[in-house]
Amino acid sequence: MAKTLVNNITHDIKLLIEQSKQQIAVTVNATISALYWQIGLRINSEILNNQRAEYGKEIVVKLARQLESEYGKGWSEKQLRHCMQFAKIFSEYEIVSTLWRQLSWSHFKEIIYIEDVLKRDFYIQMCIHEKWSVRVFRERIQSMLFERTSISKKPEITIHNDLELLKNEQKISADLVFKDPYVLDFLGLKDTYSEKDLESSIIAELQRFIIELGSDFAFMSRQKRITIDHTDYYIDLLFYHRRLKCLVVIDLKIGEFEASHKGQMELYLRYLEKYEQVEGENTPIGLILCTGKNEEHIELLQLGKSNIKVADYITLLPSQEILREKLNQAIAIAKRRFSGGD
C-alpha cells in the first residue's frame, strides 16, 4: 500500500514538473520574440524617419558592430535584419503578442520572408494546429505544402474563411487536409515497383506517411476485407480523421487515374457508410493515390462535388523549381475554372 502511495505521489509530482517546464519554455520563447519585435520596431521607426536607403544600411551596420562588441555574435547585422522584417510583417501588437505564445522565434524566422499573406497565414495556423517542430515546419515550407494543399486552388475568400474557421473555432475543412501531390520520397522506392511494394513501404514508414498526410489521421487497417454479395473486396488502407470525424479510404494505384477507379471507390465508401459509420460521424471520404491524372476526367466525373479525392504521389522529389512550376500551373488552371475562364 505504501509503495502504491509513493508511486501515485511520484506521478503527480512528475506531472507538475513537466507542466512547469512547458510554462517556463513558453514564457522564455515569448520574451525572446517580444524583445526581437521591439528591437525591429525601434530600428524601423528610425529608418522611416529618414528616407535615404544608405542611411538605413549605415544605421544597421553600426548598431550590429556596437551590439556585438557588448553582447556577442548573436547580434549580427543579419539578426537585426531578421528583427526588422519580423516587426514589418507583424506590425500589429495584438496579433503578434498572441502568436509569440504559440510559436518560437525559430518558427517566426521561417515565415517572416513569405510575402503572400494568405500563404503565410496558412503556415501559421497549420503549424499551431498540428504542433509542428521547427524542423517539420521548415520541411513543410520547402516541400511547398501550401501549393500542394487543395485549399490553394480555391478562391481567396474561401482560403481566408477556412483559415479563420481553423483559427477561431479549431474546425478544419477537407480542403485544408488533402493535398496534391503527396511527397513519398521517404519510401525509398526504385523506378519499378508494384502496388504491394508501395503499400508495404508505406506500412514500414507509417509514422512518416502520417506526417505527410497530417497529424489528425489515425491508422485503422491494411487490406481490410469487405464482403458484398458473396464477393470479397480489399481496401488498401483505412484511416480515421479526428477533426473531420470520418473514415478515410486510401486506394493505391500504379499508373494514371482511370474512370473505373471512381466506381470501385464509391462501392467502398457506400459500404462503409452503411455498415461501419457510427452515430456522430460524417460521411467517409475516399482518396485515390496515382502517378498521374487527366484533369478532364476529374471534371467530367464531377469528383470535385463528391467525397472522392484524386491526387498524384511522387516517390522522387524533383527540384524545387520544377515542383514550383508544376504546382503554380495547377493553381492557375484551377483558379481560372473558378472564375469562369477557359
Image (tube, helix red, strand yellow):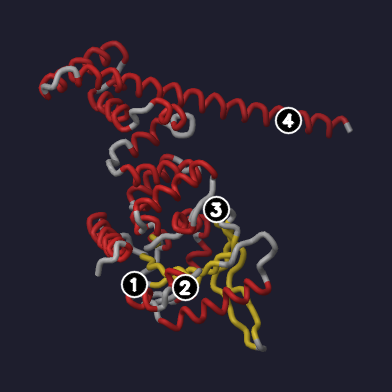
Residue at x 46% of width, y 30% of height: 98
**How far is mark 3 from mark 2, CA to CA?**
20 Å
Q: Amino acid at mark 4?
A: Asp
Q: Amino acid at mark 3?
A: Asp
The residue carrying mark 1 is 191
| C-alpha distance separating marks 1 and 4 | 53 Å
User: Along the polypeptide, which appears first: circle 3 or circle 2?
Assistant: 3
- One can see residue 211 in this view: yes
Residue 40: image quadrant is: top left
Q: Quadrant of the C terminus?
A: bottom left
Q: Is residue 284 above or below residue 44?
A: below
Element under disc 2? strand
Q: Name the residue carrying label 2.
A: 252
Q: 297 or 223: nearer the eye?
A: 297
**Which of pointers 4 and 2 lies earlier in the amino acid sequence?**
4
Which badge, 4 or 3, comes first in the chain's sequence? 4
Q: Where is residue 112, by image quadrant?
A: top left
Q: Which residue is mark 4?
A: 12
State the residue at coordinates (64%, 78%).
Answer: 226
Residue linked to disc 3? 216
Q: Are marks 1 and 4 in contact (CB under 8 Å)?
A: no
Task: Estimate the x, y position of residue 39 in percent, counting from the top left.
Answer: 32, 19
**Amino acid on which disc 2 is placed:** Leu
User: Dot 3, crowdedness within 10 Å: few (<14), some or many (≥20)?
Assistant: some
Q: Circle 4: is it few (<14), some (14-19), or many (20+) Cα within 10 Å?
A: few
